[in-house]
Image (cartoon, rainbow, N blue to C red):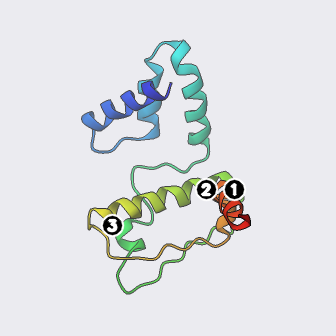
Amino acid sequence: QKIKLDNVLSELRKEKKSFSIDDLIEKIDELPAKTSDAILGILHDLKNMKLFDNIDNPTVDKLCKQGYLSIIDFSKIISQKKRQMIIFYFGNLLFKKRMLNEAPPFVFIVEEAHNFAPQMLKLVGQFQRE
């Protein structure tokens, strides 16, 4: 299923500069039901989270502006899964932009990071005991 999803995403990227989750659902829906059912279930769950749009808000330029501090307040977002997805998305995007020299140097701090990377904490704990 992951391979099929990757293929559809590659196809959409070739067709359009930007696409919506609805475009992705439409393309996946064209696949045989055996392949598409599980993927469609997950995509509909993601769509219902209302996290996706055709533009980022805030934009990387606003979020990572040299000499400024950006704080994203997640206190009104109850779902831990939503928080994790947003932090992963912006962290990954900022890292990629920085690697391409499209963003200034920055520090990315996540308060209560143990809620976002618990597996890593277990691994660190193992090293500390040895």
Chain-order first, disc 1 or disc 3: 1
Which residue of the protein is positioned furthest toward the bottom in this rendering? 67
Cα–Cα span, label 1 and label 3: 27 Å
Q: Quadrant of the C terminus?
A: bottom right
84 relative to 129, above or below: above
Residue type at the position of mark 2: Gln
Q: Is residue 89 left or right of residue 54?
A: right
Q: Residue at x 48, y 56 (%)?
A: 89
Coordinates of residue 121 in the picture (x, y in percent): 68, 61
Q: Is residue 15 left or right of residue 82?
A: left
Cα–Cα span, label 1 and label 2: 6 Å
Residue 84's label in the rendered image is: 2
Residue type at the position of mark 3: Arg
Determine which quarter of the picture holds residue 93. bottom left
Location of mark 1 (residue):
80
Coordinates of residue 43 in the picture (x, y in percent): 55, 34
Q: Is residue 130 left or right of residue 96?
A: right
Location of mark 3 (residue):
98
Kind of element beneath mark 2: helix
